[in-house]
Image: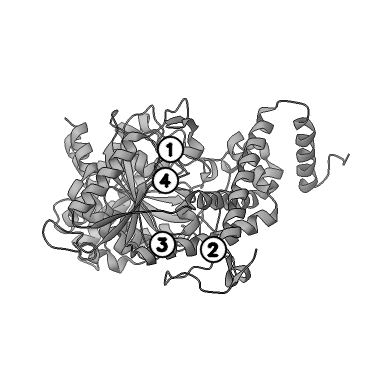
Amino acid sequence: MPSDDSSPDTRFAQQLLALAGVAAEEDDPRLVAIANELAAQTRFSALIDAVLADGGVPAEAVVNAVERFDPAWTPATGAEVTA
Amino acid sequence: MSDTLIHDLATLTIRDAIRLLDARAISAVELIAATIGRMEVTEHGIHAFVHVLANQAREEAIAADRHRVAQRRQRPLLGIPLAVKDLYDVTGYVTTANSEQRRHAPAATRDATAVANIRGAGSIVVGTTVTQEYAAGVVSAPARNPWNTDRIPGGSSGGSAAAVAIGSCLGALGTDTGGSIRTPAALCGVVGLKPTWGRISTAGIYPLSPSLDTAGPIARSVPDALTLFFAMANRAAEIDAVDDLLSPFGLGERPLEGVRIGVLDGFFTEDTQSEVVASVRDAASDLRTLGAEVIEVKWDNALAARAVGAVVNRVESGAVHHDHLRNEPDLMKPDARMRFEVGQLIPGSRYLRARLAREVLRDEIARLYRDQRLDALIVPTSPATAADVETLTVEVPSGTEPVGSAFTRLTMPWNTTGQPVVTVPCGNDAEGLPIGVSFVGRPDDEITLCRIATQYERATNWFQRAVAASEE
């Protein structure tokens, strides 16, 4: 195990590993909350997968998925690409 | 000053206060005294404020009245008392964000841009208001709901909404990442405007999820909300034109003639309390009576839009609090810590796919507006009225639901699309708790959105009706 003077990143990783170990053995409320939230996130991800599968992704969105906002409020018309 | 006068002045709208100040019928000193006085008699039960800037506000009010007497160039909000969510930097005060980790943080040395802008327009900051820890939640403890102090005000701008509703300020600044302006505004029976993402600077506001975080106002009327929007966005020159900008679309009893409004059911109503659904249906009927063409429309991916917002929110907030989780995790409350830890456990690929899906959904909703020629959509703001502070759950048709999901699931889709939304009171449940209806507009067109909502508000006036009923 890393020593007590390990970096914050290492300590955080240690905590996560400890959580994973405890999760297998104990009914810790904090772990249950995290597990439930991760389960919800998995369901959310399935919905997102469905959107990407059904809708196609505008080509420009692949290049620039961050902060694009079309002030003219018209749909993108770029070529569809498969996810 | 009599208690009655304090109450009357403290419950003015901003637009009325501007008119009275301009006519010299009241002074800024009287207005500040009224709101501070209101605060003094209500704070023991409402707990809306973190810092009260009473002395500073009184001094600024004296200066405002001197400026007015000297007839120097008037600033449009000169002397108007406003409150600011404890997430915005206010010079000289610690932005605590309701976190133990920030109790000993240094005081802000400059105002957040939006705070500087409202001060530049002449308004007076009377205090900073309670939020949830790092704005991550809907409870806003210890703040309480003015309509029933056993209920939460909603969040995370809960203190701002409670302060506006009770009369401790004439308007307030909030932020909205998943519903944090709209939900507390609806639960407290006031108006909340989430502008288009990016319209108001978030500089100097503690971030939660930067690609979703939106600064905006909470007020007692739609014209007040647009007034504050202009002030926050450094567009104070447009404040004098608000009444003209919000003029009716049609004549006489048909002020919404020519306006086309879509009603979204399905996701927005299927697990919503019956009284809330009934009030929003009544609102649709009222809109028809006012001349609007109201049609039923569908958006099958509303649930997916909520999912996108949830994933983006978790990952970005996990990144924002990277250092806090490593250095002082025990100073975080369990809910916030869990949310941020989960954000760090979601793979990067999931985040990027959520961002891609966000683009698809923005296009999809744009297509809906274009194909249906919509000027606005209406939906319930929240699926339930204010929750009990002890249970922190609400009863909806599918059963008992925790407040964290209940009070974000109908609002978050619009953070994903980034559209402007204004929530307006539209009724009360059997216990008298307020219900809100959301008008969802086109991006970057807050003026048309507020113009539509104003016609509804003028015709129904739920806020003033409720105030009158509470005084009987």
Q: Which of marks 2 and 1 is in front?
A: 1
Could you tell me if the residues under marks 1 and 4 are in contact, i.e. CB atoms within 8 Å?
A: no
Q: Which of marks 1 and 4 is nearer the N terminus?
A: 4
Of callouts 4 and 2, which one flags the residue occurring earlier in the amino acid sequence?
4
Check residue B394 in the rendering and tell me which mark sits there, or answer none: none
| Residue nearer the viewer, B340 or B288 | B288
Please state the horizontal and vertical placement of residue B191, each as a whole percent of the image.
31, 48
> What amino acid does circle 3 point to?
Leu
Query: Residue B321 at x, y = what percent?
Result: 63, 48
- Residue B316 horizontal/vertical position (percent): 61, 53
Callout 4, which amino acid?
A: Gly
| Image-based side of B210 in relation to B424, left or right | right
Give the quadrant of residue A53: bottom right
Q: Name the quadrant of the C terminus of chain B.
A: top left
* Classed neighbour count for the residue bearing mark 4: other residues with Cα under 10 Å, few (<14), some (14–19), many (≥20): few
Task: For mark 3, name the chain.
Answer: B
Q: Is residue A24 above or below residue B22?
A: above
What is the crowding at mark 1: few (fewer than 14 residues within 10 Å), some, or many (at least 20)?
some
Q: How far apart are marks 3 and 1 (CA)?
A: 23 Å
Residue under pointer 1: B271
Q: How crowded is mark 2: few (under 14 residues within 10 Å), some or many (20 or more)?
A: many
Q: Which of marks 3 and 2 is nearer the N terminus?
A: 2
Q: Pinpoint the chain carrying mark 4.
A: B
State the mark number for residue B359. Answer: 2
Q: Which amino acid does label 2 sit on?
A: Glu
